[in-house]
Image (cartoon, rainbow, N blue to C red):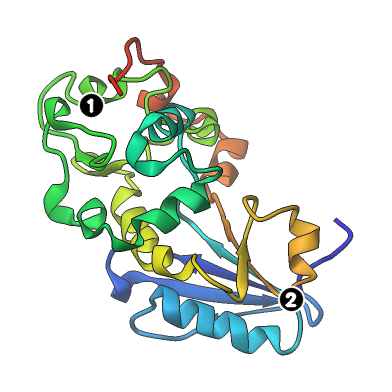
Amino acid sequence: MKSQPRFFASADWSKDPRKRSVYVADLSERRIYRQARPDWALASLMALARQLSERGSVLVGVDLALGLPQSYWELVVAEPRYGQPATFIDWLEQLADDSGFFDPANTVPNSEHWRVDRPWFQVPGGPGSRTSFTEKVDDGFCRRIERNTGANPLFIVRGIPGTVGSGTRDFWRELAPHLSGDRNFRIWPFDGPLSDLLERGIVLAETYPRLAYAATRQPPTTSCQREGRTRVPN
């Protein structure tokens, strides 16, 4: 990479702001420290990034999904209301005024009620309850990284251990209004190559701690390692 960040701010994100934490690595000084705050939000995280950017480029990493499974993306592009967005960022920007998409009250309780505009779901009790959702599409609502590491589909918000849906949904809700206009940060990989983006200041990107676990042991089998067999109608 021709450009390296001066700082790497790594955020451990949770649905509960009190359980979030942020660590900063100063690469030039080879120093890592925790940035203390009781209630992190996107606004305060990016305020920290702006402060750090006065001394050099900043890579902000968050351990939640920034992107969509291929199967869901195909449904988004085919949905007239979204107007065939070019990237995940274009689509998310449209959702800034759609509070219903991010409303926890619209979490789908069973697979019969799943819709493209209501993708977040809880896994009910009983055998086959998760696969009733994941078998709707060929990739089980999993990106390649979830399949390779044995993680859960990103749209699951509760019902089984190891879900990231609730934290991802909350972060997307905060992020969407900041995507229009002249923003002072870029999002990798949707805005371009990482090296080029770092030359312009602040870059937001997804991190994936589970990759470290998958590199040291065989990941458990989950629904992301099983292919679906049908497709949701457009």
Q: Is 155 above or below relative to 9? A: above
Res. 130 mark: 1
Amino acid type for the residue under numbered disc 1: Arg
Outermost residue, right side: 2
Q: Please identify, in this view, whether the residue under mark 2 or under mark 1 is nearer the observer.
A: 2
Location of the N terminus by quadrant is bottom right
Q: List the residue tagged with mark 2.
A: 57
Towards the viewer: 154 or 214? 154
Question: Residue 205: x and y, percent?
Answer: 59, 58
Q: Position of residue 102 (x, y in %)?
A: 25, 56
Kindly indicate the quadrant of the structure image that contains residue 231: top left
- Above-or-below relation of 207 to 201: above
> On the picture, is 124 further left or further right than 102?
left
- Quadrant of the image occupied by residue 233: top left
- Residue drawn where x is 43% and y is 26% of the image: 71
In this view of the protein, can residue 14 be seen by the observer? Answer: no
Q: Amino acid at mark 2?
A: Ser
Query: Residue 227: in sight, yes or no?
Result: yes
Nearer to us in this view, 158 or 176: 176
Q: Residue at x 15, y 20 (%)?
A: 127
Work out how far the residue at label 2 is from the one at label 1, CA to CA, in angstroms.
Answer: 42 Å
Taking the image as shown, residue 173 lies to the left or right of residue 84, namely left
Instruction: Locate residue 72 relative to residue 60 in the image: left or right.
Output: left
Give the vertical position of 151 relative to 158 (above or below): above
Where disc 2 sits, the SS reads: loop
